[in-house]
Image (cartoon, rainbow, N blue to C red):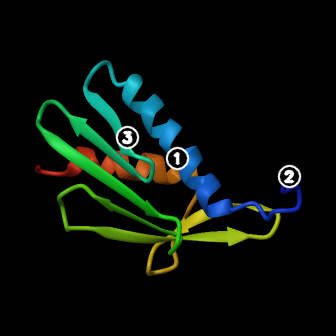
């Protein structure tokens, strides 16, 4: 049975695009960052020196992404699907980030984190 006319889940697509971007950024970090994806909807990035951790979790049911760098606890973003455009991640203050921008943002926040 084929499901040709199934709607594309743009939020899930955005998550599936974000994970490889984070993995490439870690691979290009000259061993400073370690990428792990212990579960389908969870990512863990560890920085070796100083030791810090970034956790990301995606909820396909709620279409939300949560991340935590240890600075101020969990940050939650909505994944906003837009007609004929790529999905974006949106803060509670309605600031939007593309997948690429979010990748850079969470890695920058990891670098600022004291732990």
Where 101 sits versus 91, above or below? above
Side of 115 where 55 appears, left or right:
right
Q: Position of residue 97 (x, y in %)?
A: 54, 61
Q: Which residue is mark 1?
A: 18
**The disc label shown at residue 37, or none:** 3
The secondary structure type at the circle numbered 2 is loop
Mark pair 2, 1: CA separation: 27 Å
Where 46 sits versus 75, above or below? above
Q: Residue at x 49, y 43 (%)?
A: 19
**Label 3 crowd (10 A; few <14 / some 14-19 / many >=20):** some
The secondary structure type at the circle numbered 1 is helix
Q: Residue at x 24, y 55 (%)?
A: 69
Mark pair 3, 1: CA separation: 12 Å
Where 31 sits versus 34, above or below? above
Side of 1 where 47 appears, left or right:
left
Mark pair 3, 2: CA separation: 30 Å
Q: Which residue is mark 2?
A: 2
For marks 3 and 2 on the same chain, the one whose residue lies earlier in the sequence: 2
Side of 101 where 12 appears, left or right:
right
Q: Position of residue 106 (x, y in %)?
A: 37, 51
Between 40 and 49, the residue placed more toward the observer is 40
């Amino acid at each position: 049975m084929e499901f040709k006319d199934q709607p594309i889940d743009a939020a899930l697509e955005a998550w599936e695009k974000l994970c490889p971007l984070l993995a490439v950024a870690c691979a290009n970090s000259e061993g400073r960052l370690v990428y792990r994806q212990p579960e389908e909807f969870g990512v863990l990035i560890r920085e070796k020196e100083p030791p810090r951790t970034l956790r990301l979790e995606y909820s396909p049911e709620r279409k939300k992404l949560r991340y935590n760098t240890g600075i101020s606890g969990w940050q939650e973003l909505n994944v906003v699907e837009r007609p004929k455009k790529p999905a974006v991640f949106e803060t509670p203050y309605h600031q939007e980030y593309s997948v690429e921008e979010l990748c850079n943002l969470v890695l920058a926040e990891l670098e600022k984190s004291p732990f």
